[in-house]
Every structure is written in structure tokens, then in C-alpha cells.
Amino acid sequence: MKQYFKVAVIASALVGVVGCQSTGGETSAVSVEQNKNTPSIATFDALQKQYSLDKTTFDSVSEFQIYSESTYASMMDEWLEAKEIFLEIEKEPGLINEEYSMFSSGSYAAKYMSLVTNADAQFNKLKSYKENADIVLSDAIAQMTYINSIDVQRYYPQEFANLNKQYKALFVTVIEDDIAEAQTEQASFLTKAKATEIKTTLKIHVEPLEKEFSILSSKGFKAIAPISYGQTKAELDKTKKAVQANNRDQALIADVVAKTRFQIDHLKNMAAEVKLLKAVKNGQFEQTVLEFENKLLSVSQAINGDDYRDQPLRIQTESILADVQQMHEKNNTADLEAKIKDLNVQIKTLEVTVEKQTNDRADVQKQVLVLTQQLERNDNLINNLNSVIASYKEKEVAEKAAEESLSSSEEPTTVEDTAAIAEPTNTKEAEVQESKEVVAETVEAEVSSTDAVNIDAESIPVESTTVSAPAEEIKVETEIK
């Protein structure tokens, strides 16, 4: 009986759930009908732009993980969920205004914005943590950056893992506002990190040299060439100490490593020569000495053709060195003198060119100034001539009008009357002729003064101006050369 009762209760609950689901479906259908009436493209475009901005932000926040891994994880969870919602909307833009679930009244767009808002809140926390940690843990951050730059993890993975764990713990202490504890732990971290840094630098630069030197030692090079062996070992020890004391000075490290490499190669070559000498049988060293002497002879012959074989080997070597030094000094002096001569010639040529260009420029500027003034004077002269001619034209018109009126009133009957009438006309012509002569003299004087200006480059023509006089044309033409 109890079993039947339980089955009945479960069936009632299922019916209630089905009823709720049908009601929600009807509500969704009504909502969809309403959304169909309003275009959703504009809203989707706005959401798409917002998503583009959010994606740019949250895809470049990995550097903030170190400041709080838990906060960073919460932020990324919110963002990934929001990203999934947008991808759903992108596939079916009509979902943007539909309810996200039957247990919430918000739409897909509202759910997306809610998740992004939560992610932004977590991101702001990370920014705040970063601001404090960058100040308190500045030394530790710089040390860890350098450790990563020399790839400590490659050479000492276990030690790097321990340092990284200790490094992350420093940021947790800062979040808890325990600054004193953070600084104490930072000092401990720096000590361990520095030791690992030096250890890694030695492994990169010095350990290969030590391995090679150890191989030479195992081959008996100490017994074969003890002096060279001792020099190489001393150079290697000096290099190791220099790297330990200056493990970040890359230039110094390169220099001391090169010196040690040179000593190791020298040790190899010296041991090889000693082995050759030891291989000589029955103490017959003459052939070896002759070979060495022939090498010295070939060098001296190449330098200046001298032959020093009548001297001991030590003297031969010193003489060759002196010849080489003298040759270099001569060559350097000749090269330097030739270069100095060339430079002096170039300097003199440039000085002459500059001086000539300066003088030419000054002359041209003066000539341009004179020409400008002369052109202004010519313009004034032409204007004056035009004024004179205009006044004569007015007089001529007035006199012609007077003659016409006089001739119409009465005609002259005697020769004396005719002469009396013609006399004013003759007087007028005489005045015009005199004016023309004055104008011609003035123009000639102006042209003469203009001809005094000489420009080497080319002649500058000035337009000719033609002026009409009462009886004939007065033509003024100037050419400035």
C-alpha cells in the first residue's frame, strides 16, 4: 500500500513539472513572436562589437595569473562561459533576446553581459594585486625574469620548480597584506635564486671547458707538456672565478672564455709537437731542426729576401720579428701620408668651391637689386611719357575743334589771313617736335644707364612700349644686358 502511495506522489510531481514546462514553452513562443516584430540585427551587431573588445582583453591577461591563481581561474571561468554563450548566439542570432533558461528571466545577451561583468570584477582585483606586488616584490620579479632568460629550467629543472613554487607563494603573502613576511620570504628566495643563477652560468660557459680539460688530463697531457698544462689550468681557474663574480657581464665572460679556449688549443698543439719530437729515433734531431730552419727562411725571404741561416735559431727569429715590425711601420706611414694628402686635396677643393659659390651668390644678389631698381625707373618713365602724350592729344582735339569752328564761320580772303591762321598750327607742331626731342633724350639716357648693368648668365629683355603721339608714334624699347 505504501508503495502505491509513493508511486502516486511521484506521478503527481512529474505532472507538475510537465505543466511548468508547457507554460514556459508558451511564454517562450510569445516572446519569440514579439522578437520577430523587432529586428535583432542591430542588437547582435552591438553584442558582436562588445565581444570583440572583451576577447581582446581576456585573451591577453595571462601575465596576471601569477598575482592570484584562484582569482585568475575564476575570471577565466566566467569568460569562457560567456564565450560559449556568444558562440551559440552567433550560430542563431535570434536567441539573443530569448530567455537563457527556464530557471532565470534573463536573455542570452543579458547572461553574456552578466558573465563579462563578473569577469571584469575579477580582472580589476588582479590589477589591484599587481599594483601592490610590483612594488613589494620588485626584486623577486626582476630575478625571476632573468632566471627565465638564461633558461634555468633546461639545466636544473628540479631547482627551478622549487624556486617557482617559492616565487608564487610570495604573491599569496602580498594578497594577505603581510608585507613584512613577504619581504622576509623574498630575501630567502633571492639568495637561492642567485646561487642557481651563478650555477647555471657556470654550466653554460665554464663546464664545457672543464670537461675538455679533464679529457686532456686523462690523456696524459700533464706529463707530455707540463708547462703548457699548468698555464691552461691557471687560465681555466681564473675564468671560473671571473664568471662567478660577474655572472651577468656577458662581455667579460666572452673574453675570459676565449682566453681559456686559446690556452686549451695551445696545449693541444704543444703536446702534438712534443709527441713528434719523442717519436724521433736514435736522437736524430737534425732533420727536425732543418725543417724548422727552412720555415724561418721562407718567412724571411717573403719579407725582404734576407737569409739568416748563418745565425743561431734564436737570432734568426729575432731578426725576422724586427723585419716584420719595420715593414708594418713603413706600410702604416705610407698609408697614413697618402690618406692625409688626399684629405688635404679634398679640403682645398671644397674650400675653393664654397668660396666661388659664395662670391657668385653675392654678385647675383647685387645685380638683381640693380635690375629691380632700374625696372622701377623705366616703369616711371613710361608712365610719364603716357601722361605727356595724353595731354598733347587733348590739346590737338581742342585746336582741331577751334579750327573747324573758325573755318565754318568765315574763309580767309588774303594770304596774310591764311598765314595768320596757319601760324598757331606751326607753333603747335614746333612744340610737339621739341617735346619729342626731350623724350628721346630722356629715353636714351635711361637706356644708357641700363646698359651699364651686365649679368654674365644671360640677357634680360624688357617688353617694348609703344606710345602714340598726335602726329606719329613714339616707340621706347629697352634691353638690359
Image (spheres, rainbow, N blue to C red):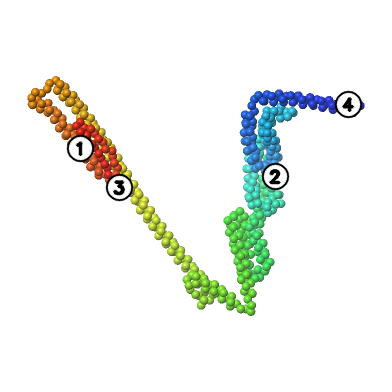
**Is 224 positioned to the left or the right of 415 in the image?**
right
Residue 349 at x, y percent in the picture: 37, 55
The extreme right residue here reads: 1
Q: SS class of the residue under badge 1?
A: helix
* N-term mark: 3 or 1: 1
Residue topped by disc 1: 440
Upstream in sequence: badge 2 or badge 1? 2
Q: Are marks 3 and 2 in contact (CB under 8 Å)?
A: no
Residue type pointed to by label 1 = Ala
- Comes first in the chain, label 4 or label 1: 4
Amino acid type assigned to the residue bearing label 4 in the image: Phe
Q: Residues within 10 Å of mark 4 (few under 14, many from 20)?
A: few
Identify which amino acid the numbered label 3 is placed on: Asp
Q: Nearer the viewer, mark 4 or mark 3?
A: 3
CA separation in Å, label 2 and label 1: 109 Å
Which residue corresponds to mark 2? 169
Compared with 370, 252 (above or below) is: below
Point out the frontmost of discs 2 and 4.
4
The image shows residue 343, relative to residue 165, as above or below, that is: below
Residue at the image point whose x is 38% and y is 53% from the top: 350
Residue closest to the eye, 294 or 404: 404
Disc 2 residue crowd, few under 14, some 14–19, many 20+, Cα 10 Å: some
Q: Quadrant of residue 92?
A: top right
The residue labelled by disc 3 is: 456
Sequence-first disc among 3 and 2: 2
Q: CA distance from mark 2 to mark 4?
A: 59 Å
Mark 3 is surrounded, within 10 Å at the Cα level, by few (under 14), some (14 to 19) or many (20 or more) other residues, namely few
Q: Tell me where residue 442 appears, x and y as whole percent.
A: 21, 38
Q: CA distance from mark 4 to mark 1?
A: 143 Å
**Residue to which mark 4 is pinned:** 5
Q: CA distance from mark 4 to mark 3?
A: 129 Å
Q: Is residue 132 visible?
A: no
